[in-house]
Amino acid sequence: MDVRALHDGWTLRPAGGEVPAEVDRAGRIPAQVPGTVHTDLLTAGLVPDPYVGENEAALRWLHRSAWEYRTTLDTAAAPGERVELRFDGLDTVATVTLGGTELGRTVNMHRTHRFDVTGHRGGDLVVRFDSALEHAESVEKDIGARPRTYDHPYNAVRKMACSFGWDWGPDLQTAGIWRPVTVRRWRTARLATVRPLATLEGTTGRLRVHVEVERSGLEAATALAVHVDLGAHGATTTELDPRTTGAVLEVQVPDAPVWWPRGYGEQPLVDVAVRLCAQDGTPLDERGLRTGFRDVRIDDSPDEFGTRTVVVVNGTPVFARGVNWIPRDHLLTRLDAGRYAAALDDAVDAHCNLVRVWGGGLWESEDFYRLCDERGLLVWQDFPLACAAYAEEDPLRTEFEAEVRDNVTRLAHHPSLAVWSGGNENLQGHEDWGWKEELGSSTWGAGYYRDLFPALLAELDGTRPYQPGSPTSPEGLHPNDPDHGTNHEWDVWNRLGWPHYRDRVPRFCAEFGYQAPPTLATIAEFLPADQRSATSPAFLAHQKALDGNGKLDRGMAPHTGVPSGFEDWVWAAQLNQARAVSCAVEHHRSWWPRTAGSVYWQLDDCWPVTSWAVVDGSGRRKPAFHALRRAFAPRLLTVQPREGVPHVVVVNDTAQEFSTRVLVRRTTVTGQVLGRAEFDVSVPPRAVRTHPLPLVGGDDEPVVVDAGGLRAVHLTAPDKDLAWDPDPLRVSVSRVADGYAVRVRAQSLARDVTLLADVVEPGARVDDGLVTLLPGESRTFRVRSAAVADADAFAGALRTANRFGRP
Ligand code: BMA
């Protein structure tokens, strides 16, 4: 097999729709492949950056435009040679023409498309993209509208749902050749599919490689041989007689290296080579991949509280410390391995062991799963269906089946891939969002979640657990029942306020989140200087949530009040988000093993926006990142109510016992110690211990709890009602190798000390935040930065909760 990328020499031009004159006049522009129309127009300077100001709206004309990509292709073939053109991804409604002959049409960006061009005379290769929106509208007209959460009929076309806008994302609707294109020349036979499934049984690793071959048909069928080679771990070979097109090869590895999620063990990966040869030994085709041996299932057995959802890896129940993942850039083709690695390292640094790939996005890139394999991040993969009813008829049904086959086969070898899930909030939407009346007798997707998807997985991948959707509960129960299965908690953000996370004890919280604006440096990137207010048109163009600012204000009002200055308002919202994150995660973890998962909505953003993300669209960590990191640390100290009484809870999610002395101090609001108590706790591995909190009185005074280097602050009164020292810190700064050491010393109780490093320099990153210090205590923040800055600059970037106290 000779494989060549076809990425050079492409041009692009408009081919329909109402295109602005300057774009029309530009004629053919250079096209980057893989790429999109949006990114090429940007590079050519023909459109403004859609991530800045109100430019998104100015690009709406692209929704109803058509485009033509063009290059030339030489298809000349030697005798006996087959030539094929393979597109790993076309976004989305495409017609492929070669030398004037139509090769085919596509309507699904989530699939790979192959065209046999053997015997073709070659020439101009043209890929025309028509408006995906207009296609979806016409499909909807043909098969009947189905309920959905947003304006456009994203549920009528197999294009990433959030392409059409979401409550954190722009409505840009890209088009283009978004994944690699290759020309493949082969003879005799090729590997059509290779589907390796690795499991662990006791101490034996078992790799079963399902192989299908395609014969060229241009010569007499001969016997073939398939080899599977695991290097030092073993190998096997099988012969395919001329009538056979498939085989399953198995290699058993005694005492196999075992892959674990991070925090539970190592992530050894095993290289596998699959080779196809002719009878005489001539190599014909090969595939190389890395896999790992582990066993994964979900314990969904009933118990006295309801129905469990516990991810069990290699027999060990795992508390899922997770984050939800949305596409890291709306302009997907700008993502590379480095950006994926940086984003997944954010998850790692936040002590996560699981990432849920949300159903409004993608079957992610190869890089994504490889990086998760290497980092020990379990992947919970939604099938890409979200917040809508989906017709079960054609043209959708055929596309779903083909897409699932493609992607399950493509991803099967990744040990990180742990759970398949039928989609996001479709079961709940059907129950709660008035769909039943709207649907009448129309299909809505139940047949996918209950029949088609499980049947395809039974055929293709019996090694991983499958959930019909998220959230889900056993049949007959409400899909979002917190006592059963998985749960999404949105009432807290929408109406209740973060202290209400504690009202329920979910079995596995797969979504909960709280908004805040991005960092100030990121705000400066998208917000014109004359629009620096939370109500300016440009700010609101980057706040997509229903009544988003209203919810932010009502959420912060009881805690910090609603500051009037823009920067104070941003900090209050960010602090409130951080408090919400701590409140929810600490609550969830304190209930282990009854609660077995806390998957925060959301890790990342796809552009600069006010959202639930802890890392903003420019990759800067919001203050809530530090809250998540502390709340997800293997050892956690927290104060939680039990039957209305505050308790110290020590969570030990490590393999070693955690024995420590707990020091409790009751202080004034400025930090004078009024009383102290001590006791010992000993927490077994992967366990939680609870002890009544001493020294709590009727007053609103802070109680500071310390144990083993961890600190928890118990405070019933809101910041705005307390007479904090408004200026509790003294700062000194020294230059260190890669930036600065910023030492802060508290003169008075300093609550949630946070250094907004990006204010000093947009590229700066600080190692910690939301630190509470008693008088006399100090903390040194490490800032990585290339800038030259002075102590005053860092002092100006320090924030505390004290700022919101009463005068
Ligand atoms: C959940 C997600 C997303 C949404 C988020 C915030 O429903 O599944 O659809 O962006 O809430 O509203």
Image (cartoon, rainbow, N blue to C red):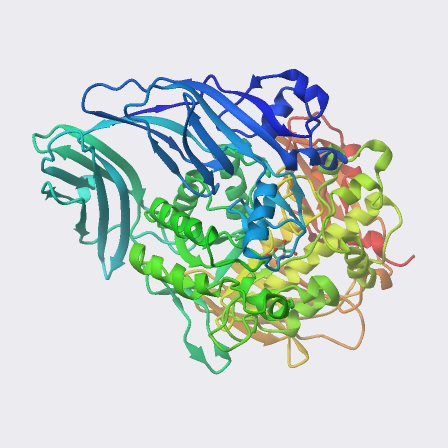
Asked where in the image residue 609 lies, by quadrant, the reply is: top right
Q: Is residue 370 left or right of residue 792?
A: left
Residue furthest right in the image: 807
Q: Is residue 79 left or right of residue 184?
A: left
Asked where in the image residue 503 lies, by quadrant, the reply is: bottom right
446 w.r.t. 780: above or below:
below
Q: Observer-nearest residue: 559 or 141?
A: 141
Q: Observer-nearest residue: 635 or 222?
A: 222
**Picture residue at 30% right of the left edge, 27% below the top:** 184
Residue furthest left in the image: 280
Q: Does residue 401 appear in this view? A: yes
**Picture residue at 70% right of the left edge, 48% below the top:** 778
**Picture residue at 67% right of the left edge, 16% below the top:** 25
Q: Is residue 622 left or right of residue 156?
A: right
465 w.r.t. 78: above or below:
below
Q: Is residue 560 left or right of residue 618?
A: right
Q: Ligand 1 appears in which quadrant?
A: bottom right
Whole-percent x and y of residue 645? 67, 79
Whole-percent x and y of residue 23? 67, 21
